Image (cartoon, rainbow, N blue to C red):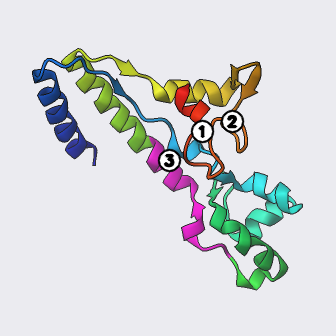
Amino acid sequence: LPPDFNTAFGEVITKLAATGAKLVVANVPDVTAIPFFTPAPAAAGLFGVPVQLFLLTLGLGPADLLTPDAFPLIAPILLNPNTGPLPSNVVLAAAEILAIRSATQAYNTIIANQATASGAPVVDLAGLYETIRARGIVVGGHRLTINFLGGIFSLDGVHLTNTGYAI
């Protein structure tokens, strides 16, 4: 929880600063925007099903995200809608996404405040991620993106490629 993190992070920053080390901290990007997740409307296109029918049949909202584990379950439900909806453990619902983003913002605020208090600069990974998400980034003459196979994330859609880590 953010209050516990505030206390723990403050203690760590204080103890590290007391050693005389030069500190640099980083904030947290939006983890709901990684290519591990597929927006439900995009998945509808992959299955060649109209978006509204797809959402209704699978019990999804337009802002929901699907995990890779959802995909083997989709075709059988589309063929026999009585077997739906998709189980919640393969869907990141819009309300969950909002809660995650709100928590991430709370943690990033704590990180920024604690860094300011200790004089440590903050590497704005969240801002960098949003910039790459919006425009991509050119590396070696190629425009890389956060999309699946976009060059920033590995094939698991969670971890970065070597290039992603280097950026």
Q: Confirm or deny contact between disc 1 and disc 3 (CB under 8 A).
A: no
- Cα–Cα span, label 2 and label 1: 7 Å
Mark 2 and mark 1 residues within 8 Å of each other at the beta carbon: yes
Q: Give the residue type that dot 3 points to.
A: Leu
Where residue 112 appears, x then y in whole percent? 32, 24
**For the residue labelled by badge 1, is the local secondary structure a helix, a strand or a loop?**
loop
For label 2, the residue is 151
| x and y, in percent, of residue 75 in the image | 80, 74
Mark 2 neighbour density, 10 Å: few (under 14) some (14–19) many (20 or more): many
**Considering only order in the chain, which callout, 3 or 2, is on the residue closer to the N terminus?**
3
Q: Quadrant of residue 7?
A: top left
Q: Magenta stretch?
A: 85-101
Q: Considering the numbered disc 2 on the image, is that residue within a helix, a strand or a loop?
A: loop
Horizontal side of 135 relative to 94 (left or right) equals: right
Q: Position of residue 36 (x, y in %)?
A: 62, 52
* Residue at image location 62% in from the left, 52% down from the top: 156
Kindly identify the amino acid type of the residue bearing the numbered disc 1. Answer: Thr
Mark 2–mark 3 Cα distance, whole angstroms, equals 27 Å
Question: Viewer-proximal residue, 136 or 161?
Answer: 161
Q: Which residue is mark 3?
A: 98
Choose between 161 and 32: the one closer to the eye: 161
Q: Is residue 89 left or right of residue 52?
A: left
